[in-house]
Amino acid sequence: MKDKQIEKLIRKEKAWQKNVVNLIASENYVSSDVLAALGSELTNKYAEGYPGKRYYGGNSIIDEVENICKERALTLFKLSPNEWHANVQPLSGSPANLAVYLALLPLPSTLYPNRPKIMGMSLDHGGHLTHGHKVSATGIFWEQIPYGVDKKTEVLNYDELARIAKEKKPHIIVAGYTAYPRKIDWKKFRAIADSVPAYMMVDMSHIAGLIAGGVYPSPFPYADVVTTTVHKTLRGPRSAIIFVRKDARELHKKIDKAVFPGLQGGPHENQIAAVAVALHEAASPAFKKYAAQIVKNAAALASELKKLGWRIISQGTDSHLILVDVWMDGKGISGKEASDNLESAGIIVNKNTIPGETRTPSDPSGIRLGTAAETTRGKKEKDFIKIARKIDAVLRKK
């Protein structure tokens, strides 16, 4: 690289990533093939529109790449192209979610003076900003109807969700979260959505790789729309996919228009090629073993931390992530201090709010841990038990 300043920083970052224990639940390590696609000549192309309907010439090969990516997305999740549509152009998860809302919810206007409602999990209970939080565009344009987990069990109470939906009558109900470690009963969400009635949207960004690997229930038999990022448990580049059920409502056509020209111009075709590569990798038998190991490793990490005296939110995990109460009503340390101390020891986590949070988002009570990245590096249960003990030693300053 001729730019030695940037080259030096890239090398430093590469060395740093190699030498730390990465427990960020939303991160992973992509293959050299994914990196090759990202850095390919496909980045030179401008391809506004969709395959066969571009606004620029010279895109016949680009069309092939995008069509292959769409086909692989449907195949990976065992979806028929007659029943489901995939849009692989969203640049990341937030614009993917925003595109769904723009397509299915009217914006406030003189015709719609009352803001349409998005029923999504509140941020401190494990939801995402784009599920209607007030600081997000999704909470500015539309009204969030928040829900959370049960105070005692710290898991979803579907009877309470049904009560909220019946009372508030949301237009969309969002299931799928950023810091909820347990399995979700998609069938119950479908019943709740039908009772309103409301669209059922699933954001499976964190668990997509687990679903593809067959170790987490699939939402596709029940959802109207499913969004996902590709860079978490799917182990792909930073990107997103929107899956839309095909029926008489033609939601897929509305959502395609919301992505382009509604929100984006030309798609990043090098990124789409890298997604296609990652989807191909995820269809392999090796990936199924990888997904199963992620869950085993998370269970081992949660179990050992619990034995060492740390409070695990919901008492455990069914996925790749663990939410740990490190504050423990003042008996432990804050989430920020925990994160900072662990980083100094070469263990990377993120501070995180917990259900019933009593502290601030910038210095909350918890930390969030994930096992996907270190499982990519080949770690097994015994390795995560050692990691748990090191975490304990650092947090207790032994």
Image (cartoon, rainbow, N blue to C red):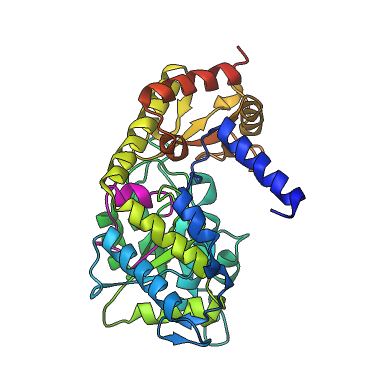
Q: Is residue 375 left or right of residue 138?
A: left
Instruction: Name the image quarter holding the C terminus.
Output: top right
In percent of width and height, residue 36 lies at: 50, 56
Q: Between 214 and 334, which is closer to the camera in this rendering?
A: 214
Residue at the limit of the structure toward the front, as seen here: 2
Q: Where 230 sits versus 79, above or below?
A: above
Q: Is residue 317 visible?
A: yes
Q: Is residue 213 left or right of residue 92?
A: left
In percent of width and height, residue 222 lies at: 26, 62
Residue 219 falls within the magenta-colored stretch = yes
- In which quadrant of the rendered view does residue 75 lie? bottom left
Q: Where 69 sits versus 59, above or below?
A: above
Residue at the limit of the structure toward the right, as seen here: 5
Instruction: Give the residues drawn in magenta, as a range.
Output: 205-227
Residue 244 falls within the magenta-colored stretch = no
In percent of width and height, residue 184 lies at: 32, 48
In percent of width and height, residue 233 lies at: 41, 47
